[in-house]
Amino acid sequence: MERLYLIREIRKPEKPVLAIDIGGTKISMAILSREGEALTGLTMPTEAGQGPEAVIERLLDGIDHLLSGNGLLPSNLAAVGLAAAGVIDIKNGLVTTSPNLPGWRDVPLKSLISQRYRLPTFLINDADAAALGEHRFGAGRGLNTLVLLTVGTGIGGGIIIDGELYFGSRASAAEIGHMVIDVNGPKCACGNSGCLEALASGTAVAREARGRLMRGALSSLVEMAGGPLENITAELVHRAAREGDILANEVIAQAAFYLGIGVSNVVNIFNPEAVIIGGSLSAMGDLLLQPVREIVKDRALPLLARTVRILPARLGNDAGLFGAAIYALEH
Ligand SMILES: [Zn+2]
């Protein structure tokens, strides 16, 4: 029944929309009906290290393959909704920079797609798209104001105010991962130090575990990694923690602490009804979220802390695709 939302809200032609989510490791695309049903889709590796030209060439091949494989012409679609991991100039449809897509600088992704397929095309940041997806179809349905954090390799953010995405003046708002939490903290991919992303992302969790092991701490992680410490990932730390490994639990508790501080700041600034935690680390569930809830209760202003809910995202990896489609259909 929740799918009816789109039908009511979007009084556009009956055609489906092509949604594409370009991340640092994979590209997902799907053709979605106006009711939010995925009619067909495909996922492929981004191979971001090959640079923008190669990635875009493969992206276009993927779109052609998806359309022809389903007997569709571009004219059978209403629009294209793109989400990309990077700082997006929403007005001009550019991926201006991206820590996860090396070499991308002012790439005119929107016009490349719109000119090739002659379709209305929209480009937004992937975490913004995920926030929109979770608001319309996921953990944030029915709320007015929410903030979403995607905690994975990095930390992205999306802000919904009065039911709409908040972009800021140049569409660069919600870079919550680059909120400074510890002025003396570790170096961040953005060049600054002590950002939330440098303290509580999956990359930070893996780095902290490796650092403790190199300083001589004992852990089942060494055996689980089965070789060099570089094999240690946040996912492996999570597995070790579930099996009772003390070091792994301490590392996750530390990341949760910093995440809780970041979320407390977000709560104080936006007074949201909910803060939704998505991204690969949200698979840790209450191991990550329960400490965050307790820190928010301790650290955010009491009136704001009392009313906010800290929720896991519901749409998983599909949130960005849904959000990209919704944004295209609503605009
Ligand atoms: Zn940063």
Image (cartoon, rainbow, N blue to C red):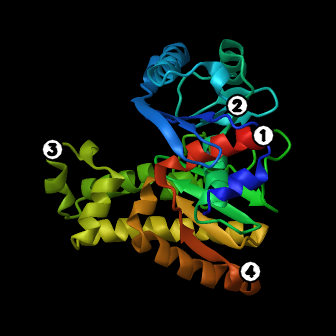
Q: Which mark is residue 277?
A: none
Where is mark 4, residue-wise?
Answer: 304
**Residue 118 as seen in the image, left or right of residue 44:** right
Closer mark to the observer between disc 3 and disc 4: 4
Report the amino acid beneath label 1.
Lys
| Mark found first going from the N terminus, 1 or 4 | 1
* Front one among 140 and 79: 79
Quadrant position of residue 91: top right
Gap between marks 2 and 1, in whole Å? 8 Å
| Mark found first going from the N terminus, 2 or 1 | 1
Where is mark 3, residue-wise?
Answer: 227
- Residue 202 visible in the current orientation: yes
Give the x, y percent position of residue 219. Answer: 20, 64
| Mark found first going from the N terminus, 2 or 3 | 2
Report the amino acid beneath label 2.
Ala
For the C terminus, give its image quadrant: top right
Gap between marks 2 and 4, in whole Å? 41 Å
Q: Which mark is residue 12?
A: 1
Give the x, y percent position of residue 78. Answer: 70, 31
Where is mark 2, residue-wise?
Answer: 78
Considering the numbered disc 3 on the image, is that residue within a helix, a strand or a loop?
loop
Report the amino acid beneath label 4.
Leu
Gap between marks 3 and 4, in whole Å? 47 Å
Total labels: the figure holds: 4
Q: Residues within 10 Å of mark 2 (few under 14, many from 20)?
A: many
* Front one among 331 and 309: 331
